[in-house]
Image: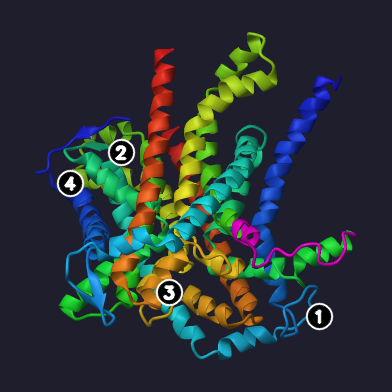
Amino acid sequence: MIPERLKDRFVDVFLVGTVALLILFFYVPILTLVVFSFTSSRVLTFPIEGFSLEWYGELFRKPDFLPAVTNSAIVAVISTVFATVLGSAGAVAWIRYRFRFQNIFRAISFLPLLFPQLLLGVVMLLWFSVLGNWLGFSTGLATVIIGHIVYITPFALVIVAVQVHGFDETLEDAARDAGASGWEVFREITFPLLWPGILSAATFAFLLSWGNFYVSYSLAGTARTLPIFVYSGIAVGSSPIYPALATLNFIPALVLVFLADFLRRRALKRQKLATA
Amino acid sequence: MRTDSKRWGDPVLVATVAPLGIVMLLFFIIPLVMTVVLSFQTTQFYRLSWTWDLKIWTEVFSKPHYWTIMARTVAMALVCVVVCVLIAFPAAYALATRLRAYNAQIQILIIFAFLTDAVLKTFGWILVLDKSGVANWLLAHLGLGPEALNLLFTPTGTIIGMVYGLVVYPMFTIYLSLARIDRDLVLAAYDSGASRLRAFFEVTLPLARPGLYCGAVLVFVLSLGAFLEPKVLGGGTAPLASELIRQSFETRVNWPLGAALTLVLIVIGALSLALAAAVLMRGNRGRAVQ
């Protein structure tokens, strides 16, 4: 008979171990890419043969690399702005208001989240192709941006909705009682209280758009974003420039995720102090 | 949470609802309708012709080749669901019960991994799973012999990639339902003499069911569209529905066929969502009766 204490200990180790293994699982390909980016050999075998930075240089000498970066940046910035604004407004309507046809609104603003990205891209591609035939345009960066907005807005909506759900509306009442106008209440109370959620949503939106492959691949036409650049590259053959690109890609993402979390927590702390 | 009833004449309501509603209507709902419409057309000399017949649908239903691939897609999706849930449940449980102090840090690590470029991560898996890659090097140095693993370009490689991309979803939904469980209920079960195991199976697990089902169905639906993993990690040896759809657009330039195959996948996804909703609803009613 195993003593109860030992059994509990075993369960603890198993559970904590699962999380540790899962994090390891998440980071295995990421760390592998970072290691391979410093190889001095053209062949990607492990362990790497020597240390060099030549593939970073090689990457920048690729003529279609920087245009792809520019395209990704344009798409990500515009989609982030739209997805965050539409998602935040939608989240308020989702949670705080009751109105006719609300269920239809909820369904159509949430459904893209339940769609495999590839199918979302294909369905939109069909529509843009038919529309393009009628109106005389072809798919490109503009259609990618629209696709990203449709795909990403539901994510932004869910993140802001969580913030709206925990919202203390008595603060608004207090401001109104003190004589603030509707716009002042929004500017001084509502928006600052929702800000941490909006910030998380924007970070999510930016990174989802920046790294998006499926929707862009369907809707880009001849335009190229960074993930398409990588996909068409690795389809031809592997090269150490892709690990170098990956490593360069991780740094700003990491900074962004940590910065957003820091700002979010600072805002939450301020709120706690303000309400206390 | 207090809610305000609003009428459609209210400018605030219009301002919050209309922009998003219009975007989704124009670029999501209408495209879906268009896909249905297109599946009843045909192509002639690589150009769409508006004929309104059932030719494409007869082709789809009469070719066993398509249904073999659809069946394989569903089978892969089911394997993916099982593996994801088996990993996600204990991890979510640990996060909700044992690792509360480190939750913020762990969440950030997971979110960062989730949000980085999927194509690059898939390429990273090639470098790990390759014959001369990290996994085999590690196994050789652990004394398990050279080339103990040959996972790249096999269905197992595809599953690893799909689980990698999707396991976050059930982890999140299961965590949310576990975190909402009232701790007192579990303590009450202990007080009335239940063992830890029994309390888990009779209190915690049933209460976590919504998150479990939501996560599972989300993984299933999303894995129906997997394209990168079977192509890059599976080596294209066992093509899935996504590959079939891509080919009908790119190689055969047959939009109606692509539209019809897309609809088949959407219907499979929608049916599984409806099934999950029905099962959850019945579970809730059962509890209400008790």
Q: Is residue B144 magenta?
A: yes
Q: Main secondary structure of the magenta part?
A: loop
Q: Residue A49 has which mark?
A: 1
**Front position among marks 4 and 1:** 1
Are the numbered discs 4 and 2 placed on the same chain, yes or no? no
Q: Residue A71 has which mark?
A: none
Horizontal and vertical percent for residue A223?
38, 81
Residue depicted at x 48% and y 48%: B220
Horizontal and vertical percent for residue A205?
42, 59
**Front position among marks 4 and 2:** 2
- Depth check, front residue: A211 or B216: B216
Q: Tell me the kind of residue under disc 3.
A: Ala
Left or right side of B118 for B61: left
Residue depicted at x 76% and y 76%: A45
Q: Tell me the kind of residue under disc 2.
A: Ile
**Front position among marks 2 and 1:** 1
Disc 4 from disc 1: Cα separation = 63 Å
Residue depicted at x 59% and y 77%: A245
Left or right side of B163 for A28: right
Q: Is residue B225 magenta?
A: no
Q: Residue A95 has which mark?
A: 2
Q: Tell me the kind of residue under disc 1.
A: Glu
- Depth check, front residue: A230 or A73: A230
